[in-house]
Amino acid sequence: MHSPHHVAIIGGGYAGMAAAVELATRRIPVSVFEASRTLGGRARVVNLHGRKLDNGQHILIGAYQETLRLLQQVGIAADTHLLRLPLHLEFPDEFCIHAPRLPAPWHMAAALLGAQGLGWAEKWAAIRFMQAMQAAAFRLPEDMPLTTLLDQHRQPARVRRYLWHTLCVAALNTPAEQASAQIFLNVLRDSLAAGRSASDLLLPRVDLSTLFPDAAARYLIQQGNEAGADKPTLHYATNIRRIEQIAPSPTPAAPTAARYRLLGDTGECGHYSHVIIATAPYHLPPLLAALPATDALARQVADFSHQPIITGYLAYPEHVRLPQPMLGYSQGIMQWLFDRGQLDGHAGLLAAVISTAGPHLTLTPQALAARLHAEIAAIVPHLPAPLWCKVINEKRATWSCLPGLQRPSTETALPGLLLAGDYLAGDYPGTIEAAIRSGVAAARKIS
Ligand SMILES: Cc1cc2nc3c(=O)[nH]c(=O)nc-3n(C[C@H](O)[C@H](O)[C@H](O)COP(=O)(O)OP(=O)(O)OC[C@H]3O[C@@H](n4cnc5c(N)ncnc54)[C@H](O)[C@@H]3O)c2cc1C
């Protein structure tokens, strides 16, 4: 039986492709419109010096249940496409915490007690904080900046620096002084305080378009071949400019009929019963301009602020290798350093990550690359000069995860007009897991 619906999805990032997969699985006709020639949005492949790399180095964690479920659904084997490592945070010669393969919660207690670079009083302070949050079910009566919560629980400077602030910037991409303590606790609850595998680090072994969106596109085509007439369609390089409402004319065969018309750069892009807008929040207002009922929504997202993430790729001779696939750094502007040779086989290629805003943003790409090389040389002995460097600055990598920020929900003021994206109301900060969850949730509103 053919579905009475035809759903348009605007945006082929992780959220949009998750929505498309969910709809295609349920045989609901879907058309995806992606402005770029590449799927993945803020988590996408870029071609550099003949290599398939990413617009920014990403980390997933074991708690990304919905992401792992969808990867499996579209035929991506997590075992081969992600390097799974027990939580291991190492700042060479300063700090190291490693979660041993013990059942929860012993893995985390053992990790904190065994942390190198903290004294006993500091370790107990960290354990006490975790216990207090556990006792409160990781819920705060009122949201506050993370540093306020850490003050209340007398967390020592080094515990903040190497643990809580580090995890906050890695997960929320927002400095601890500004970050939502509640969202931080949500992440803590689902990772460090959950089963042991939930805190595992999952490092992509393929580029980020291959990891999910391209596989999702293949899945759509395959479902289409099985679905007969109502094949999903995927339109690359198609920028949607505006959504317009049209008077619905339902028939017994198509009870909901078309309610929306999409207009793209090159003209009309069809009529749809439902539209899922799966863009970043800053792409929403122009799309909503012809829909006055959504004015409040457009104003709400216009108030969001964003945080950058810089990834500096530095290619060295192939023998250059880090002692771990991922290292922390606290002595300069670099925060994390990844060895792509140990991830996707690009031997000698290092990816340095700088999250959130800071004085480094005033540096030119050349000066940034030189600075990153100097900082890498401080932890990699006998480092030769890089063969090439490329700095990618994603200026609006994620929305600033501020205390009490009101975020939109899946449904809008208009029937059949739905939202997906990492910024929607939910437990998580702007992450791949938030994007995927939001896409699945939007698709499930359509029955
Ligand atoms: C450098 C960097 C590092 C990050 N690190 C991590 C990490 O380690 N772990 C993690 O979980 N998350 C990380 N994130 C966040 C993660 O990438 C995002 O949360 C996630 O990709 C957001 O997905 P999305 O589908 O909601 O939005 P987007 O990825 O922004 O997708 C929206 C899509 O819509 C398209 N689009 C926009 N307007 C239109 C239009 N008018 N017509 C058609 N198409 C349109 C865009 O081209 C885009 O493809 C990082 C992000 C960046 C940038």
Image (spheres, helix red, strand yellow):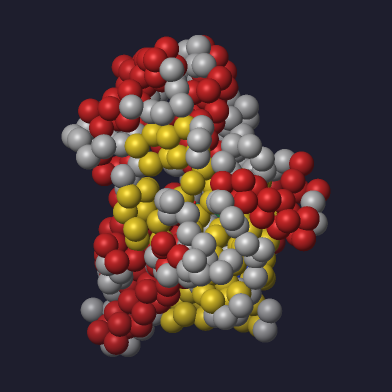
From the viewer's side, name the closer residue of 32 and 93. Answer: 93
Please tell me which residue is depicted at 48% across the width and 59% down the height of the picture. Answer: 321
Give the image location of residue 121, x and y in percent.
42, 12
Q: Would you say 205 lies left or right of 248 here?
A: left
Quarter occupied by the C terminus? bottom left
Q: Would you say 94 lies left or right of 49 here?
A: left
Residue 303 seen by the camera: no
Give the image location of residue 30, x and y in percent.
41, 74
Q: Is residue 365 above or below residue 230?
A: above
Q: Is residue 366 above or below residue 191?
A: below
Q: Would you say 388 lies left or right of 212 here?
A: right
From the viewer's side, name the closer residue of 359 and 132. Answer: 359
Q: Is residue 422 above or below residue 209?
A: above
Give the image location of residue 84, x and y in percent.
31, 54
Quarter occupied by the N terminus? bottom left
Identify the image quadrant of residue 23.
Answer: bottom left
Give the image location of residue 338, x and y in percent.
50, 55
Q: Is residue 422 above or below residue 348?
A: above
Please tell me which residue is depicted at 30% across the width and 82% down the height of the picture. Answer: 222
- Outermost residue on the front side: it is 382
Please tell me which residue is depicted at 66% across the width and 70% down the height of the picture. Answer: 388
The number of callouts visible is 0
Residue 338 seen by the camera: yes
**Ligand 1, image quadrant it occupies:** bottom right
From the viewer's side, name the closer residue of 75 and 266. Answer: 75
Please tell me which residue is depicted at 59% across the width and 37% down the height of the picture. Answer: 330
From the viewer's side, name the closer residue of 406 and 324. Answer: 324
